[in-house]
């Protein structure tokens, strides 16, 4: 996938992801992505893996947003998506209207604790995580 963001993506924010992954038990990788599915900051993976995870997380986030607007009694903004796999855990947290934060962790990870820490990170640095829309793009 060709991106508009030079690799490594937004290294000025990569330290936030590194700090999150390094201090949480069983967390392995993280990516901050735009609603366009492009990685903006990455920790723990190469460019190809970051592109794949960002695209997957953007798709999950978009699907959850649609569910939130279409399903009766389930409405509202998407806050977090948790996917449990045999090989691990994927958590995607909204990071404003144009961004999301995705973290991959080992199966032993405490999903509630990881999700909570991700939400705290997003809340504390929301302005830094905001990603401007590209020209001609829609959120």
Image (cartoon, rainbow, N blue to C red):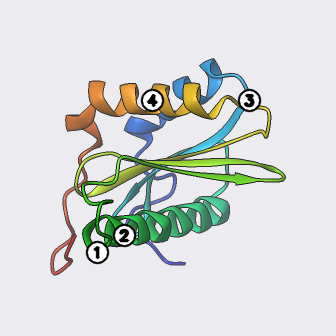
- Residue at 54% in and 78% down: 1
Ranked by sequence position, the earlier of labels 3 and 1 is 3
Residue topped by disc 4: 16
Q: Please give the label number shown on residue 26.
A: 3
Q: Position of residue 87 (x, y in %)?
A: 83, 51
Q: Residues within 10 Å of mark 3 (few under 14, many from 20)?
A: some
Q: CA distance from mark 4 to mark 2?
A: 30 Å
Residue 119, image quadrant: top left
Q: Given this view, does label 4 or label 2 mark the residue nearer the observer?
A: 2
Ranked by sequence position, the earlier of labels 4 and 2 is 4
Extreme residue toward the right, this view: 86
Q: Residues within 10 Å of mark 2 (few under 14, many from 20)?
A: some
The reply to whether the C-beta atoms of the residues labelled 4 and 1 are less than 8 Å apart is no
Residue topped by disc 2: 67
Q: Given this view, does label 3 or label 1 mark the residue nearer the observer?
A: 1
Ranked by sequence position, the earlier of labels 3 and 4 is 4
Residue topped by disc 1: 70
Quadrant where the C terminus sits is bottom left
Q: Given this view, does label 4 or label 1 mark the residue nearer the observer?
A: 1
Q: Position of residue 33 (x, y in %)?
A: 42, 56
- Residue at 29% in and 60% down: 73
The reply to whether the C-beta atoms of the residues labelled 1 and 2 are less than 8 Å apart is yes
Residue 138 vertical position relative to residue 77 in the rendered view, above or below: below
Extreme residue toward the left, this view: 135
Q: CA distance from mark 3 to mark 1?
A: 35 Å
Residue 83, image quadrant: bottom right
Q: Position of residue 47 (x, y in %)?
A: 61, 60
């Amino acid at each position: 996938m060709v991106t508009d963001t030079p690799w490594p993506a937004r290294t000025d924010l990569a330290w936030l992801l590194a700090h999150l992954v390094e201090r949480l038990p069983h967390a392995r990788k993280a990516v901050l992505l735009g609603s366009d599915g492009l990685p903006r900051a990455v920790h723990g993976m190469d460019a190809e893996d970051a592109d794949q995870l960002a695209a997957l997380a953007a798709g999950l986030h978009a699907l959850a947003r649609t569910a939130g607007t279409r399903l009766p009694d389930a409405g509202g903004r998407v806050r977090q998506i948790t996917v449990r796999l045999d090989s691990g855990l994927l958590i995607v947290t909204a990071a404003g209207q144009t961004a999301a934060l995705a973290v991959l962790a080992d199966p032993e990870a405490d999903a509630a604790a990881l999700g909570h820490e991700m939400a705290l990170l997003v809340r504390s640095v929301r302005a830094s995580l905001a990603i401007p829309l590209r020209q001609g793009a829609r959120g």
